[in-house]
Amino acid sequence: MTPRDSKLIALLQKEVKPALGCTEPIAVSLAVAKAVEVLAEHGSDCEPACPLWRLTAAFRIRIAVSGNILKNGLGVGIPGTDMIGLDIAAALGAVCGKSAYGLEVLKDVSEAAVSRAKELVKTKKVILEVAETPHLLYIRASVCLENKNGTAETTVGEEALAVIRDDHDNFVETRFAGKVLETVRNSPSDPVSDACPDDYDLTVREIYDFTLRADDADIAFILEGRRLNLALAVEGLKGDYGLGVGKTIRENQYEVFGDDFMSFAMGMTAAASDARMAGCKLPAMSNSGSGNQGITVSMPVIAYAMKYGVTEQQLARALILSNLVAIHIKHYLGKLSALCGCVIASTGSACGLVYLRGGSYEQVCAAIKNMIGNITGMVCDGAKVGCAMKVASGVSSAVQSCVLALRDTCIQETDGIIDKDIEKTIRNLGRIGSFGMQSTDRLIQEIMLRK
C-alpha cells in the first residue's frame, strides 16, 4: 500500500464510523459524559467507585451550543427514550454516557438511566442556551453537583467543563474548577485536512482510481457499514418508526411505486432513516459525522447488491467510492450547513451505482453533475423524522442521475452552477452551501425557535 493510499484509508476510517442516534444530540451527550467523568475524577463529593453513583447524583447541567447544533437537536428522537431534544440527550449523557464510546456514547442506556434522565429534565436541572460562537459545530457542557438544599452553592468552583468543536467527537478543552486540564489550540476545522495534512488535493479522479486499484483486504472494513445500516433498514420496515416512509413505500410497491429497483432502494434507505430519527437503539454507520448521510450514501448501493447479487468485493469498492465522494464534497461545505446532507450523500450513492453498473470515470463525473444540477436547493431545517422523506427523494434522484450518466447524458456547463471541470462544480456547490446559504440558515433557525 502506498503512503497516499494509507492516507485515504485513514480518512475513510476517520469519517465512516458507528453512531448511535442523531449525531448532534449525541455530541451533546458526549460532551456532558466527558464533563461528568472529569467531575468524577476531581470532585470532592463524587463516588465513582459506586456503580449507582451517576444514577443518583444531583447533577446540574448547563449546555451552550451553536445554532446549527440547536437546529439539528430540537426535533429528533433520542435512543432508548420516547423523547426528543437536547435536554434529554444531555441528561442521559450525565447519567449513563461513556466518552470512550465516542458517537456510541449512549450504548449502555437502560430503563433506570432513562427514568433518572427524565427526572433531571422535569425538575429543570438541565439548562440549554445558544452560544455566541463563529463555529457552526460547538458544544460547551458544564456539570456540577448541587447540595442537599437543592442549590449549587457548596460546589461553586467544583464545576467540570468539556468543549467539543468543529467535529462531533472532537474535544478541544476540558476544565475543572476553572483550571484547564486539556486543550487543543489549533484543532482542524475539518477532518479531511487532518487526515491529509498537505494542501487539500483530493479529487474525484483519484477517488475513482483508488476504488479500482485498492487491495480487497485493505478495504474490506467498509462492509461493516452494510451490517449496521441494513439492520436499521430491516428494523425500520418491521417496527413503527417516525412517519413510516420506508415501510409505506415498500407496502405500496405494486400499486403505486412499482416493483423496481428505484422503489426498493428508496424504501430500504428511508426505512433505515425512519428508525434512526425516531430513536431506535441500533447504531448507524455514519459518514462525515452524520448517520443519515451514512445511511443515504450506502443503502442504495447495498440495495443494488441485494437485488442483483454483486460480489462482496464489488460492493466494497462501490461503498469506498460512494463514501469518499461524499467526504470529498463535504470538505467544501463543513460539518453543518443550511444545505441538506442528503444532497451530498445521495450524490455519493449515485457514483456507487454507476460503478456497480460498469460505468467509467467520465460517467461518475456525469452522475455528480446531474445530482448537483437537480437537488442542490434542498435545505436542512433540522434533524427530525421527516428527514426520511428527503432521504427517499435523494435516492430517487441518485438513481435517475445514474441512469442518465450511463447513457452519457450530463447537465452541461452552460447550465446554472455546473462547470466543465468536475472539481470546480463541486467547489461551486460548496460555496453555495457554506457561504451563500448563511442567511438562509439563520432564518431557518429563527423560524424554528419562534414556533
Image (tube, rainbow, N blue to C red):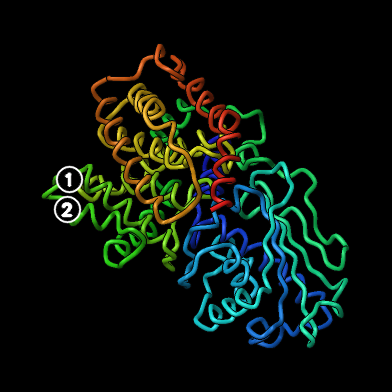
Direction from residue 353 to residue 440 in the image, left or right: right
Residue 36 lies, in percent from the top left, at 71, 72
User: In the rendered view, would you say 369 is above or below 33?
Assistant: above
| Kind of residue at disc 1 | Phe
Residue drawn at x 69%, y 43% as measured from the top left: 135
Viewed as shown, does residue 241 lie left or right of 18? left
Name the disc covering residue 252, or none.
2
Q: Position of residue 114 (x, y in %)?
A: 53, 78
Residue 203 rendering spot, x and y as whole percentages: 50, 27
Residue 378 is labelled as none
**Residue type, label 2:** Asn
Q: Dot 1 lies on which element?
A: helix
Q: Residues within 10 Å of mark 1 (few under 14, many from 20)?
A: some
Residue at position x 77%, y 43% in the image = 186
In this view, 326 is above or below 243 = above
- Disc 2 is placed on an element classified as loop
Task: Quickly name the residue at label 1.
Answer: 257
Of the residues under marks 1 and 2, which one precedes in the sequence? 2
Question: How far apart, in angstroms, are the residues tagged by discs 1 and 2?
Answer: 6 Å
Do labels 1 and 2 touch, CB within 8 Å? yes
